[in-house]
Image (cartoon, grey):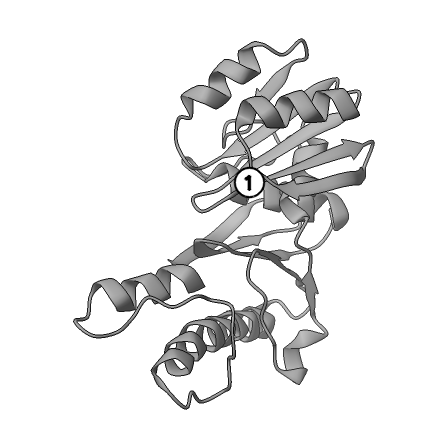
Amino acid sequence: MKLLLDIGNTSAKVAIAEGDEIVHFEHREESWYELFRRLTADFKIDSCVVSNVAGVDKQLLHVIEMQPFPVIWLTYNTPCPVKPECIAPRGLGADRWAADIGAMSMFPDDTLLVVDAGTCITYDLISPEGQFIGGNISPGVELRLKAMHEHTALLPLIDVEGETPFMGYDTETAMRSGAVVGAGLEIEGFVRRVLEKYPNVKIFVTGGNHFTFGDDVKDKIIVDHMLIFRGLIKVI
């Protein structure tokens, strides 16, 4: 079995895969020591693949050094296991590269748009040959809420969970809807623009946030919150 770690700026997620199947998933809520102790007792782990965009974690490094199985740290330099000729752009985040690999593994012959809605919302457009056509980065939902609070005198810091009417009826719902609905409309706008040029594109949306999309695009979007892990599974 393969241990998969997706360490983001806001949270860390963990999965166990057997072959191409994800058999266990959780958010990390304990120390790395306790997590590895518990998982290695419950599962027969023979390798580990890590996507980390949160910087050096000395505790994690120490725990990994203690493990008997090999560990691969995914970077943009890691060869694409799906299309060996595909080269990631220099500096591409490990999470984006993992999500791109996951999408390519599912639709290897198609143009792809991979949207990852995490701390930031990232957009990767990939050709059928695996060429990175281009991409964008914008603030994620939590970042938008935090920025409104930190850069104004009176707006509060609110939780992303709660009512999101299309038009807010008080400060809290106006801020939340502005962030959540606004981000969803942004994604829709990029999707529509890409569809104009690439009508047969396969579109993935992954990440921790959930959005409601318009009827004209929702059936064209594949929502897969495990996409990063599907890419990490493929890394040898």
The reply, left or right, for residue 165 in relation to residue 157 is right
Residue at x 19%, y 70% (from the top left corner): 152
Residue highlighted by disc 1: 97
Residue 214 image-quadrant placement: bottom right
Q: Quadrant of the C terminus?
A: top right
Most distant residue in the left direction: 153
State whether residue 81 appears in this view: no
Q: Position of residue 26 (x, y in %)?
A: 66, 42
Q: Quadrant of the N terminus?
A: top right
Q: Is residue 207 placed above or below 190 in the rendered structure?
A: above
Question: Which three-letter amino acid code belongs to the residue tagged 1?
Answer: Trp
Q: Report how many numbered discs are placed on residues in the image.
A: 1
Examine the image and state in which quarter residue 198 appears.
Answer: bottom right
> In terms of secondary structure, where does tag 1 sit?
helix
Question: Considering only vertical position in the picture, is 125 above or below 44?
Answer: below
Q: Residue 230: x, y in percent?
A: 70, 42
Q: Quadrant of residue 90?
A: top left
Query: In this picture, is 236 found above or below 92?
Result: above
Q: Is residue 216 left or right of residue 33?
A: right
Most foreground residue, 169 or 91: 169
- Looking at the picture, how far across and down is residue 21, in whole percent? 82, 39
Image position of 49 with respect to 150: above or below: above
Is 16 displayed left or right of 32 in the figure? right
- Crowding around mark 1 (Cα neighbors within 10 Å: few <14, some 14 to 19, many 20+) is many
Res 99 visible: yes
Residue at horizontal 76 percent and vertical 39 percent from the top:
24
User: Percent x, y for residue 122?
Assistant: 47, 55
Residue occupying the point 43% across, 66% down = 159
Q: Image point 43% across, 53% down: which residue?
A: 119
